[in-house]
Structures are given as structure tokens and as C-alpha cells.
Image (cartoon, rainbow, N blue to C red):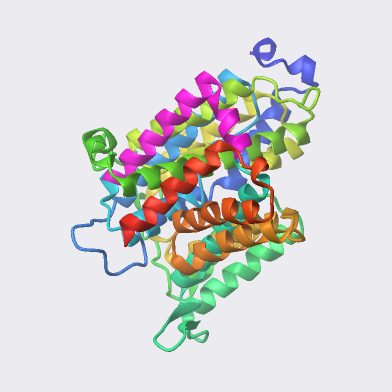
């Protein structure tokens, strides 16, 4: 095992890799509870006609297993200390845009995730993936990431009641004296403190402390016995295989845009995360990512597995840098984290104590972290600033990641052509321009 992962080459050992794997798991363990709550639309009282909720326990199991399988693939195939799990942002798009906004059944949405994963695999194996990524301007990639951050934070505030609807102004500040709102504010403050002082798993520990305080004040259900803390592995029967059964429902313009959104965001997340982790771990060689195709294949295969089990897009997590920070350098780090995700399968009863008020701080903080991309956008060039700004602004205001991407990708060719920079526009961007124009015409 030591030889396979190259412990000597990277100057590491079992103890260091185990500590790194555990650290990464703790840094991203919040997804085990946030993802089921998001996909099951916890906190949303009314659903569109004909749309049902996903089974929360089934999604919990799918989340843990998809994370474990994806991390094992990344560890054994690509040999990177990168851990995977269903991605934040894409799960919000899946639930709040595709299901709530478009009224598309979750079974069809899963089929869209499956299709995006299959396309991702094909693009990776054929080498077309790099061409597509290079065709999309870096500033728009940054804008997409920042816009998703604002969108996630807005959802977190809405779920907690910090932001509420208002007939006169569309949105307004909620009742900040409400006990549940105060619980979310407490969780946000605690999480911010933990992260500020350098606690890698600050989001996860913040959720634990928030749940405990919620139980003390009667705002969160208190487990009455060990069976409400630990139990057998939940059944995935309600979600397993639904993506295949509804695959024939994806051949519409609306679902084409949904699939493209899944694909684009996963592209950006994966590429950015792999480079960030590899740079921190000192794994880059001549400014290139060794075994890049294997890492990309692992990521896309994990999406296919996750969709089959019953969860939104599975992707590489930037929280993997937490494990690298304590010495993780090889794929064994990812293997250890995968083991912890499998162990977590037995703790599904805790879903009852992780309410919307407990998960909201995690959404807000992840939004803060993703919005850091704003600083790297070239705001001095107006032809760049306009599509970037509209991409970012449209996501939270339209309650749709896809709409934000569509508006930005429509305005980019227009402003660039008017500025006399038409030669800098890749032909793929013109194709996307046409697709997104048709998307809006279809919606109208």
C-alpha cells in the first residue's frame, strides 16, 4: 500500500495520511446533513403541483455512499488527496431552480444529473473537456462561482427566516426576535468565530453546537434514546435507479439548459479544486496537473454513481486543502475520508435534529467562501464587467443559477463585439449564445 501510493516519494506515512483524511472529512461532514435537507426541500411548505419531495433518509445514504465511492476512485485511480461529495450550489440549483422554479420532478432532475455525468466522462476520455473549458472566458467562470455563492447565502437566510417575502419590496428583514432566527444567528456567529481562529471543521462543529443549543431551548427535537442517534443504514429504495427510469424525460430545451448548467458548474468546480489542492500539496509539475485525466474521470464517474443512487452532482471539494494542510499528499488521504463517510451511514437518525435553522449558517458561510471569486474579476473592462455583473446579480434575484449563466453568456458576445474584440470570442461561445436565447424564448 505504501508503495502504491508513493509514501516515500512524497515524504508521508500512514499516521499523517490518516490524520489528513479525518481532517478533510470533518471539514466537509456538514454536507451529510445539508444535502438531504436541501434536496428534500426542508423548510419549504408548498411544492408545485405534481412535484414531490425526495426521501431525506434515502438522500442521506446516497450522499454518504456517493462521497465514499467518489473519494475511493480519486484515491486509488488518480492518487490525489482530494475528497468528493455532492456539491454545494449544484444541490441548490437542483432543488430550488429545477424542482421549485421549473416544476420538474426530482426523478427527471436526477436523470439530468446522470446525463451530465455521462457527457463529462465522454468529454474527459476524448480530450474535448479542455477545449470547452478554455473556450469559456475566465472572468465568466469567476462570475458563475461568485453568483452561486450569493445564491446559496440568500437561500440560507431565507430558510432561516432572516429574509422574508414582502409585497412592497419583494424581500425584507424577517423577525429577528424570533427564537428560530436567533438560533440561526447564534450558529452563524459561532461558525464564524471557529473559522476565524483557524478551526478547519468550523462549519461542522458550528452545526453541532447550534443543534445542542437548539435542544437546550426546545427549538430542536431531543433524541430520546441511542436508536435516535445510531441505527442501520437507511434504504435507498425511494431514489435508487430513478435516474435511469426517467432518462427519456430529459429531451427538452428546458432540460438541455439544466444539463448544461450541471455540466458547466461541475467543470469549473473540479478544475479549480484540483489545481488549488495540487498547488498547496506541491503536486504540480511544470505548471501542469499530473494524472489530470484520471482525476477528471474519477470526478465524472462519481457523478454517475451519485445520480444512480439518488443525489445531485458529486464533485471535488476544496475542503480537501484542510487535509493537505496537515500533511496529506497521496490518495490514501481520500481513502481514509471515504471510510469515515461509510461509517457515517449509521448516524442517519441525527437528521431529525439538523433542522433548517441548524443548516442555514453553513449555507451562508459557504456562500461567503464562494463569493471570494469577485476579487479576481477584471472590473476595469466594461465589456467584461457587464456580463460578469449580470451573471452574479441574476442568480439570487431570479432564484436560478441557470438564468444567471444564460444572461451572462448572452451579454458577453454582445459587449465584446461592440468593443471590437470579436476575434477573442471562441466559436463555442456563439453556440452557447444561441442555446441560451432559445432558452429564454422557450420560457416565455
Magenta region includes residue 90: no
In this picture, residue 420 sits left or right of residue 171: right
User: Which quarter of the rendering shows the N terminus?
Assistant: top right
Q: Give coordinates of residue 389: x percent, y percent.
A: 62, 63
* Placement of 158 over or under 313, stated as above or below: below
* Placement of 150 over or under 76, stated as above or below: below
In this picture, residue 54 sits left or right of residue 229: left
Q: Residue at x 46, y 76 (%)?
A: 161
Magenta region includes residue 124: yes
* Placement of 380 over or under 57, stated as above or below: below
In this picture, residue 421 sits left or right of residue 85: right
Q: Quadrant of residue 150?
A: bottom right
User: Which quarter of the rendering shows the C terminus?
Assistant: bottom left
**Residues in magenta, as a range:** 108-135
Magenta stretch secondary structure, dominant: helix
Q: Residue at x 60, y 41 (%)?
A: 136
Amino acid at each position: 500500500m505504501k508503495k502504491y501510493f508513493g509514501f516515500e516519494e512524497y515524504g508521508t506515512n500512514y499516521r499523517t495520511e490518516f490524520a489528513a483524511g479525518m481532517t478533510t472529512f470533518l471539514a466537509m461532514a456538514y454536507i451529510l446533513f445539508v444535502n438531504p435537507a436541501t434536496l428534500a426541500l426542508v423548510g419549504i411548505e408548498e411544492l408545485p403541483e405534481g412535484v414531490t419531495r425526495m426521501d431525506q433518509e434515502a438522500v442521506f445514504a446516497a450522499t454518504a455512499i456517493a462521497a465514499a465511492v467518489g473519494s475511493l476512485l480519486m484515491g486509488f485511480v488518480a492518487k490525489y488527496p482530494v475528497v468528493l461529495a455532492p456539491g454545494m450550489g449544484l444541490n441548490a440549483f437542483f432543488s430550488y431552480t429545477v424542482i421549485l422554479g421549473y416544476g420538474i420532478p426530482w426523478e427527471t432532475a436526477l436523470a439530468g444529473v446522470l446525463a451530465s455525468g455521462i457527457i463529462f466522462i465522454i468529454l474527459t476520455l476524448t480530450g474535448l473537456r479542455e477545449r470547452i473549458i478554455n473556450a469559456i472566458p475566465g472572468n465568466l467562470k469567476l462570475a458563475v462561482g461568485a453568483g452561486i455563492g450569493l445564491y446559496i447565502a440568500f437561500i440560507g437566510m431565507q430558510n432561516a427566516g432572516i429574509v422574508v417575502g414582502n409585497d412592497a419590496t419583494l424581500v425584507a428583514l424577517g423577525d429577528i426576535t424570533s427564537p428560530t432566527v436567533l438560533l440561526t444567528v447564534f450558529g452563524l456567529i459561532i461558525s464564524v468565530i471557529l473559522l476565524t481562529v483557524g478551526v478547519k471543521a468550523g462549519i461542522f462543529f458550528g452545526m453541532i453546537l447550534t443543534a445542542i443549543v437548539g435542544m437546550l431551548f426546545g427549538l430542536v427535537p431531543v433524541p430520546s434514546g441511542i436508536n435516535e442517534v445510531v441505527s442501520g443504514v437507511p434504504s435507498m429504495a425511494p431514489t435508487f435507479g430513478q435516474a435511469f427510469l426517467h432518462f427519456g424525460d430529459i429531451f427538452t430545451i428546458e432540460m438541455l439548459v439544466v444539463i448544461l448548467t450541471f455540466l458547466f458548474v461541475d467543470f469549473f468546480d473540479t478544475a479549480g479544486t484540483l489545481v488549488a489542492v495540487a498547488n498547496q500539496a506541491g503536486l504540480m509539475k511544470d505548471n501542469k496537473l499530473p494524472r489530470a485525466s484520471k482525476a477528471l474521470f474519477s470526478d465524472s464517474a462519481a457523478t454517475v454513481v451519485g445520480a444512480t443512487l439518488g443525489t445531485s452532482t458529486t464533485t471535488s471539494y476544496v475542503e480537501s486543502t484542510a487535509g493537505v494542510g496537515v500533511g496529506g499528499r497521496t490518495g490514501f488521504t481520500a481513502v481514509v475520508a471515504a471510510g469515515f463517510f461509510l461509517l457515517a451511514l449509521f448516524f442517519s437518525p441525527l437528521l431529525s435534529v439538523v433542522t433548517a435553522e441548524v443548516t442555514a449558517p453553513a449555507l451562508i458561510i459557504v456562500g461567503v467562501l464562494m463569493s471570494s471569486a469577485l476579487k479576481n474579476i477584471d472590473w476595469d473592462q466594461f465589456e467584461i464587467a457587464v456580463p460578469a455583473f449580470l451573471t452574479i446579480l441574476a442568480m439570487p434575484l431570479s432564484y436560478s443559477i441557470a438564468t444567471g449563466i444564460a444572461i451572462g453568456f448572452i451579454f458577453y458576445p454582445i459587449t465584446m463585439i461592440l468593443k471590437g474584440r470579436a476575434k477573442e470570442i471562441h466559436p463555442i461561445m456563439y453556440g452557447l449564445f444561441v442555446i441560451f436565447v432559445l432558452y429564454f424564448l422557450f420560457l416565455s
